[in-house]
Image (cartoon, helix red, strand yellow):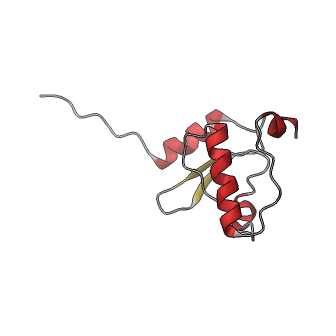
Amino acid sequence: MESNVRDKVVFQSPRNVDERNQVAGTCVRKLGIKFPALIDGFDNSAEKAYTGWPDRMYLIDTDGRIVYKSKPGPFGFKTKELGAALAHLFPAQPSRAQN
């Protein structure tokens, strides 16, 4: 991929967990990723469970259940659908009148 070459994040496939961790750390640093990044196992169980490719948006509740999964992005991202799922998960609380 041209963008990987441009961003200097082209690596051979890691052969073990240590190499995989090192590659992931380098990518996080070089790409300036500011949010927590997790590393999938060699069995790709997270990728299989979340079908994260191509891009998707997920809303996960406090019990770890997926309550919203977008269609593939970016054209499948429907912010109104995500907003509705958030509103369902966190219903508006009536405001309390100030005395």
Q: Nearer the viewer, residue 29 or 77?
A: 29
> Residue drawn at (74%, 69%), measured in percent from left and top?
42
In this view, the residue farthest toward the left is 99
Counting from the top left corner in percent of width and height, residue 86 is at 52, 43
Task: Give left or right: position of 15 versus 65.
Answer: right
> Residue drawn at (55%, 40%), measured in percent from left and top?
34
Q: Is residue 4 above or below residue 41?
A: above
Task: Give left or right: position of 43 versus 18.
Answer: right
Can see residue 33? yes
Q: Nearer the viewer, residue 88 or 13?
A: 13
Q: Is residue 66 above or below residue 55?
A: below
Split into 4 quadrants, where in the image is the C terminus?
A: top left
Split into 4 quadrants, where in the image is the N terminus?
A: top right
> Residue drawn at (60%, 40%), measured in percent from left and top?
33
Q: Is residue 28 above or below residue 80?
A: below
In this view, the residue farthest toward the right is 1
Location of residue 83 (image quadrant): top right
Task: Give left or right: position of 29 versus 99.
Answer: right
Q: Nearer the viewer, residue 25 or 99?
A: 25
Location of residue 81 (image quadrant): top right
> Residue drawn at (64%, 34%), measured in percent from left and top?
79
Number of numbered tags placed on the structure image = 0
Counting from the top left corner in percent of width and height, residue 16 is at 73, 70
Counting from the top left corner in percent of width and height, residue 49 is at 71, 64
Task: Give left or right: position of 89 versus 92.
Answer: right
Can see residue 40? no
